[in-house]
Every structure is written in structure tokens, then in C-alpha cells.
Image: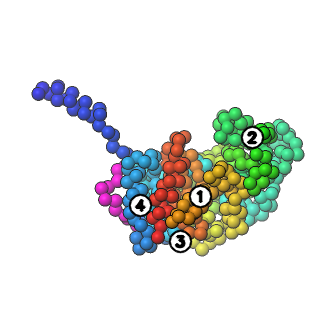
């Protein structure tokens, strides 16, 4: 056989070869307990705690098969101890993960911190009271001036703002290309209700849910005006430094206001710290960081987001099944399938970071990772 013919056959074989996954699981997955990194996390051995290691192995095999594309990390903690930590597809302990809308939950915690400090009176504070210097606003009137911080926290304000409707005046893509995001939000028209859309008085919990990133952004703007500090500076003071979080990146709007609605970057262990803070009722390593009352309010259902999901203060609540019984979990959730799952009654926290941005089915996939593997691995 001539050398040229040999090369041709080889190239033909390579052309039809199935590409290997970016990350491949070992033939026999080997569990390793997380290492103590001096970052405030206590660590534990999952096997000694009674966890079913074969479920973690099955999860790793599923990731290697490509069942859950773009996964970069999976971490699990219980009883305040980190007991599972794996990185995939270029992820690592020092990688700053783009959390997208999981930032919204962090902003809700910061609102609580501001209320705890007396910088915002309570969740009933009127949003427009913080922006009187920008008056007059378009579409002004009693309904607009009555919008409260709680309305923004629960995605139920009177604005015409719906990120899931490309025709909505307040769709986030319109905000991103505007010169002044604050003015964009304040000038939004008020929403109407088509005959087939439930009004607040006809909706569960008395609120009509409409996913609105502009509202979460404006919460960050309220925080900056209430605290007199950039959002990133207040976050570092009130939340991140008390948790030992030193590496973080916050985004800003066109006019330089901190972006409370998305895109903050955290390391995976630090995302787990945020989840642990919530699971422990506002306490981290024995120190009170956020009041227990605020955590309770944040993890109270205030609106029905969908048939399968409820909403608190910028936290989602999903329903899973474990051992034949319903097991609800609160979550920080972001585009790409990024999640921090929190089950306070089980003292359980799970982090899943991914980079599958703007892809279909990634949210159900991440929820399946949690429900089918993490929950079934529990003792």
C-alpha cells in the first residue's frame, strides 16, 4: 500500500471518529473528600457521613457522556461541612463563574443587610422615593409611585416588564442597549392585563409574577442610594468579607450603577458559602451576617412563578421528590443552568455551575442533576 493511500485511509477514519468529551470520567470514579483550604469551610468525608458514593459516580459518568453539557463544577455541603467537590470542563477552585441571574438572590440578601442597618426602612419602602432627583418620570402617576421594594423583590411590580416577552417594553435586551439603565427602568409604562392574564387580585398570593431583570437592577440602584456606596463596595462590606469571599467581579450599567440583576462572578466554594448562609438562617460559622427575619421573608412564597415553581424574594422554589415524598428546594438560579440549591430543613446546599448559556433545556437538566443524583445520594 502506498504511503499516500495509507494517509487517505487514516484521514477517512478520523473524519468519522466520534470526538471525545472535553472531560472524561475515570473507568471507576474515585471519591476524594474536599481539601481544607483555609477559606472558612469545614470539610467532611461523604462516605463516613453515610452518603451513597455510587450516585456521585453515576453523576460524573453522566457528565462525561455529555448528558449535562457545560458543567464546570458540582459541590455539595451538609450540616455546614463541604463533602463533595468536583470540577469539569475547565472549571476549577479559582475560576470566577458567571452566575448570571443568580446575582438577583445576592441582591436580595443585600437589601436585607441594608434593612438590618436601618438604611432602608423595610420592604414596603417606595422605590421612587430614592429617585426624586430624576423626576419627572414618563408614565408617572399613583400606581407607579406606589411601587415598593417588595414589588421588585417578588417580580410583581406594575411595570410593563417581562423578559420572557420580546414585545414587553421592559425586556432586558432593551435595557442593555439603552444609554441609562436607571432612567430606562423608571420610565417604563405600566402593565395592562389581557382577558386571559390573571390580575393580582385573582392570582395566588395576590401578586402577578413577571420576570423583570430591570427591577432587580433597580434594586441595586436603590441600594447604592440608600447606602451611599457602590453596590460592589456594600456587598463586600455587608456580605462578602464576613463570609471570607475575596475574589468577586460585579458588573455595572452604562451609567456606572452596580448591576444587581445579573453577571456577578464568584468561585464555586464562595457560591456554596452564600447558600450555606441562607440554609443556616443568616449565620456563617457562628456569626450573624443577615437577620433571621429577613432570611425567613426571603424564603417565603410571595408569588407563583409557574405551575411548577414559586418565588420568594429573588429566590426560586422548586418541588422535587425524595423517597416518594415531595422535597421542596429554594434556589439561586442563573442562565446557563447555574444553580445554588438550598434545603434548609436538611441543612443541605448544592452548587452546580455551567457555561451552557442561552441553551434550551439546561435548567431542567440542572434540576435533574440535583433531584436524580444529589438528593438520591443523601443518607
Residue placed under numbered mark 3 in the picture: 79
Element under disc 2 = loop
Q: Which residues are magenta?
A: 23-33
Task: Name the quadrant containing residue 119.
Answer: bottom right
> Separation of disc 4 and disc 1 at Cα?
21 Å
Pointer 4 and pointer 3: residues touching (CB < 8 Å)?
Answer: no
Pointer 2 and pointer 1: residues touching (CB < 8 Å)?
Answer: no
Task: Name the quadrant containing residue 27.
Answer: bottom left
Residue placed under numbered mark 2 in the picture: 196
Seen in the picture, residue 219 relative to 166 is either above or below; the reply is below
Seen in the picture, residue 64 relative to 13 is either above or below; the reply is below
Question: Residue placed at 56% from the left, 69% from the top?
Answer: 346
Question: Residue placed at 58% from the left, 62% from the top?
Answer: 326
In magenta stretch: residue 269? no
Element under disc 4 = helix
Q: Nearer the viewer, mark 4 or mark 2?
A: 2
Amino acid at each position: 500500500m502506498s504511503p499516500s493511500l495509507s494517509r487517505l485511509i487514516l484521514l477517512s477514519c478520523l473524519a468519522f471518529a466520534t470526538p471525545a468529551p472535553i472531560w472524561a470520567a475515570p473507568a471507576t470514579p474515585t471519591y476524594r473528600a474536599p481539601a481544607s483550604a483555609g477559606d472558612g469551610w469545614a470539610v467532611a468525608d461523604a462516605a463516613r457521613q453515610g452518603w451513597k458514593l455510587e450516585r456521585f459516580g453515576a453523576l460524573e459518568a453522566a457528565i462525561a457522556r455529555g448528558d449535562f453539557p457545560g458543567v464546570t463544577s458540582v459541590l455539595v455541603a451538609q450540616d455546614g461541612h463541604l463533602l463533595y467537590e468536583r470540577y469539569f470542563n475547565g472549571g476549577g477552585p479559582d475560576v470566577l463563574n458567571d452566575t448570571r441571574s443568580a446575582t438577583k438572590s445576592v441582591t436580595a440578601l443585600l437589601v436585607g443587610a441594608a434593612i438590618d442597618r436601618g438604611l432602608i426602612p423595610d420592604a414596603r419602602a417606595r422605590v421612587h422615593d430614592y429617585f426624586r432627583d430624576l423626576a419627572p418620570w414618563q408614565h408617572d402617576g399613583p400606581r407607579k409611585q406606589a411601587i415598593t421594594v417588595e414589588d421588585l423583590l417578588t417580580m410583581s411590580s406594575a411595570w410593563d416588564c417581562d423578559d420572557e416577552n420580546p414585545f414587553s417594553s421592559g425586556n432586558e435586551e432593551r435595557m442593555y442597549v439603552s444609554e441609562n439603565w436607571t432612567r430606562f427602568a423608571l420610565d417604563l409604562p405600566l402593565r395592562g392585563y389581557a382577558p386571559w392574564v390573571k390580575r393580582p387580585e385573582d392570582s395566588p398570593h395576590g401578586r402577578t409574577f413577571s420576570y423583570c431583570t430591570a427591577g432587580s437592577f433597580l434594586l441595586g440602584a436603590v441600594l447604592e442610594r440608600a447606602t451611599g456606596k457602590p453596590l460592589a463596595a456594600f456587598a463586600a462590606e455587608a456580605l462578602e468579607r464576613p463570609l471570607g469571599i475575596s475574589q468577586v467581579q460585579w458588573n455595572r450599567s452604562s451609567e456606572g450603577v452596580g448591576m444587581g440583576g445579573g453577571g456577578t462572578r464568584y468561585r464555586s466554594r464562595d457560591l456554596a458559602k452564600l447558600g450555606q448562609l441562607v440554609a443556616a438562617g443568616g449565620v456563617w460559622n457562628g456569626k450573624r451576617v443577615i437577620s433571621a427575619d429577613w432570611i425567613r421573608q426571603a424564603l417565603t412564597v410571595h408569588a407563583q412563578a409557574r405551575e411548577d415553581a414559586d418565588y420568594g424574594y429573588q429566590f426560586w422554589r422548586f418541588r422535587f421528590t425524595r423517597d416518594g415524598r415531595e422535597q421542596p428546594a429554594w434556589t439561586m438560579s442563573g442562565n446557563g443552568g447555574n444553580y445554588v440549591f438550598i434545603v434548609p430543613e436538611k441543612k443541605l446546599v448544592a452548587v452546580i455551575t455551567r457555561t451552557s448559556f442561552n441553551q434550551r433545556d439546561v435548567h431542567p437538566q440542572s434540576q435533574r442533576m440535583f433531584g436524580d443524583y444529589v438528593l438520591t445520594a443523601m443518607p
